[in-house]
Amino acid sequence: MRIGIVGAGGRMGQMLVREVAATPGATLAGGTERPGSALLGRELGVLAGIDPLGVKVADDPAALFRAADVVIDFTSPAATVSHAKLSAETGTALVVGTTGLSADDQAAISTAAARVPVVQAANFSLGVNLLAGLVRKVAATLGDDWDIEIVEMHHRHKVDAPSGTALALGQAAAAGRGVDLQAMKDTVRDGHTGARQPGRIGFATLRGGDVVGDHTVLFAAEGERLELTHKAASRAIFARGAVRAALWTAGKAPGLYGMDDVLGL
Ligand code: NAD
């Protein structure tokens, strides 16, 4: 399977290059960076800290989509939208890890998914996908006298908040309760907020240092508290899941898939 990586010079991009190089049955079709990037022309393997792979960082995503069977995208929302269009035009499958997408950005991905298989996940780790299933189950079991709060911490470079994973966990909790997250979420509390409203799903965002990604979902009632936590110690878990998702797209019908499909959860 020929795998292309857009944003190949990024934190996740470099991790993905290493993972593709180490995965039997996968070959690196190429990697791109944004136009004007200082990384253009650099050897992809060397940039990722491994042996040379004979491929250089390029800035022609259309050529990469033509050369690849599947492209993995952990970039930025604007770049992901243009990559989704290229994916539909070239018939190349797409794996999307970019978070912080607006409703319009998401619509572009759904449009591409009508033409090609697209796997999209806010978090490609096995543990977080299992956690989402647990959260859904617990939320369905407990009444709304149990307050749900989601706390996340990430490194100081992260640009969107709450994290895509925190929102996905909120979505799982809302689905368990049979409510709409959009209508029930509290993402900002500041000043005289008044007492907590029953049934709301609260989010708290921490940023600092080099934290790869910590998420806790708290269920708090009078007299007891249940906390479900996942901690990512390395970005390798996301890269492993994304490459697994890329291999999984072979022979799949067009559609928008999630990690639960890939993992058979
Ligand atoms: P990063 O800033 O280190 O990397 C992004 C890279 O994309 C940069 O090198 C940037 O130059 C490049 N880029 C931007 N526009 C481009 C374009 N038009 N063409 C080619 N390359 C382009 O960020 P990161 O930490 O690697 O995270 C990237 C995204 O992935 C973020 O949205 C982050 O939240 C998300 N993420 C998702 C998961 C998951 O499991 N789904 C895990 C980690 C990070």
Image (cartoon, rainbow, N blue to C red):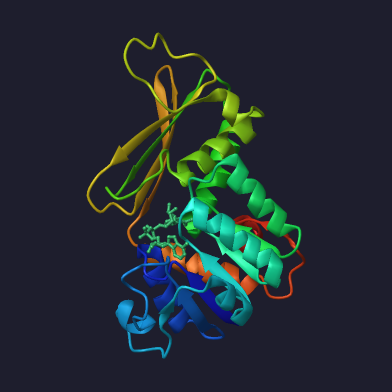
Q: Residue 225, image x and y in percent?
A: 41, 28
Can you tell which quarter of the image residue 95 is in?
A: bottom right
Q: Residue 238, image x and y in percent?
A: 45, 62
Residue 148 shown left or right of residue 143 in the figure: left
Q: Quadrant of ligand 1?
A: bottom left
Q: From what the image shows, is residue 15 above or below residue 206?
A: below
Of all residues shown, which one is farthest toward the front?
36
Q: Looking at this view, is 127 or 251 the one in front?
A: 251
Can you tell which quarter of the image residue 192 is in?
A: top left
The answer, for residue 140, to whether it is visible in the render is: no
Q: From what the image shows, is residue 236 above or below residue 58?
A: above
Which image quarter is the C terminus in? bottom right
Q: Looking at this view, is 239 or 229 the one in front?
A: 239
Q: Looking at this view, is 140 or 13 the one in front?
A: 13
Residue 22 shown left or right of residue 80 in the figure: left
Q: From what the image shows, is residue 162 above or below residue 212?
A: above
Q: Residue at x 53, y 82 (%)?
A: 29
The answer, for residue 258, to whether it is visible in the render is: yes
Q: Residue at x 56, y 85 (%)?
A: 25
Which image quarter is the N terminus in? bottom right
Of all residues shown, which one is farthest toward the left?
209
Can you tell which quarter of the image residue 244 is in?
A: bottom right
Q: Residue 247, image x and y in percent?
A: 60, 75
Total marks shown come to 0
Residue 59 shown left or right of residue 110 in the figure: left
Q: Residue at x 41, y 10 (%)?
A: 195
Q: Residue 38, image x and y in percent?
A: 31, 70
